[in-house]
């Protein structure tokens, strides 16, 4: 049985019988994929709303036939505080991190992040958001993770993202009994990790150091390794 194409329609209120004008990029993708009028689609508003729909003859409009329950969202929200590294690695981290269930990505202009990489990340925030959106469609999630522009770590540790963890080679393994209750944020440093000043800031904010195995991981691999240990563990 074929899976209906998933189409993002941000900002649209989904209701049975409503005719939804598809974004041009999404309509073009359906044409390239040879989706024909009358075929079933799944519309996603990017905030958790899902609906089945039928593609109209124009190829630019879909009529909602029924509302669907959300899919693919973990019980626990996990925000990734991601130290900026090479642009390709950051893109990979956002794509695969979205597939693994990240609720949001906050890019960290860390002391050991190269200035050129920080500038590149700042210029590519919209691209990173598109990557996250495409990953949501691919993996059958319901909510598109937010991606925030690079900022220094000092301004990001106010507790708004929940209990704080920091990935650190050599730290005790990440186990369910060591997790703070509720939503979480996990800080993952750039190549070379966070510097001493940043580590002091993390400690002052109550960050719990966690290990991700017996090897030193690249930042994009650390994102995946952390999320697979966190997102499917129910909040305490």
Image: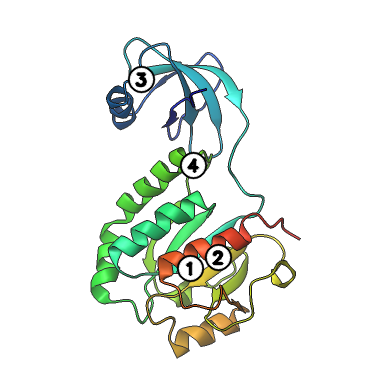
- Separation of disc 2 and disc 4 at Cα? 18 Å
Give whichever of discs 2 and 4 has the lower sequence position.
Answer: 4
Whether residues under marks 1 and 2 lie with C-beta atoms below 8 angstroms apart, the answer is yes
| Element class at badge 3 | loop
Label 3 near label 2: C-beta < 8 Å?
no
From what the image shows, is residue 10 above or below residue 204? Answer: above
- Within 10 angstroms of label 3, few (less than 14), some, or many (20 or more) residues? some
Q: Cα distance, mark 4 to mark 3?
A: 19 Å
The relative height of residue 20 versus residue 94 in the rendered view (above or below) is above
Q: Position of residue 40 (x, y in %)?
A: 47, 18
Pick the quarter of the image with the C terminus: bottom right
Q: In this view, does 165 lie above or below 143?
A: below
Please tell me which of labels 2 and 3 falls first in the chain.
3
Contact (Cβ within 8 Å) of mark 4 with mark 3:
no
Lower sequence index among marks 4 and 3? 3
Q: Nearer the viewer, residue 62 or 167?
A: 167
User: Closer to the N terminus: mark 1 or mark 4?
Assistant: 4
Residue 35's label in the rendered image is 3
Q: Residues within 10 Å of mark 2 (few under 14, many from 20)?
A: many
Measuring 48% from the left and 64% from the top, which residue is drawn there? 223
Q: SS at mark 2?
A: helix
Q: Position of residue 49 (x, y in %)?
A: 55, 33
Give the residue at mark 4.
139
Q: Camera-side residue: 113 or 37?
A: 37
Q: Name the residue under label 1.
A: 222
């Amino acid at each position: 049985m074929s899976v209906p194409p998933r189409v993002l329609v941000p900002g649209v209120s989904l209701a049975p019988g409503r005719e939804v004008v598809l974004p041009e990029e999404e309509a073009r993708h359906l044409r390239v994929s040879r989706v024909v009028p009358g075929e079933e689609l799944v519309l996603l508003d990017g905030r958790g709303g899902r609906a089945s729909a039928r593609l109209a003859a124009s190829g630019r409009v879909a009529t909602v036939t029924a509302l669907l329950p959300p899919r693919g969202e973990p019980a626990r929200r996990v925000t990734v505080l991601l130290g900026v590294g090479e642009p390709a690695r950051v893109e990979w981290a956002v794509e695969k991190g979205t597939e693994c269930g990240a609720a949001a990505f906050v890019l960290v202009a860390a002391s050991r992040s190269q200035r050129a990489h920080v500038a590149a990340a700042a210029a590519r925030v919209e691209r990173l958001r598109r990557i996250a959106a495409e990953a949501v469609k691919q993996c059958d999630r319901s909510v598109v993770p937010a991606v925030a522009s690079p900022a220094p770590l000092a301004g990001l540790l106010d507790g708004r993202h929940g209990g704080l963890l920091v990935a650190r080679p050599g730290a005790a393994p990440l186990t369910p009994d060591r997790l703070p209750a509720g939503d979480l944020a996990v800080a993952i440093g750039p190549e070379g990790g966070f510097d001493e000043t940043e580590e002091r800031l993390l400690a002052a904010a109550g960050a719990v150091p966690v290990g991700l195995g017996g090897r030193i991981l690249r930042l994009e691999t650390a994102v995946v390794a952390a999320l697979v240990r966190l997102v499917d563990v129910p909040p305490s």
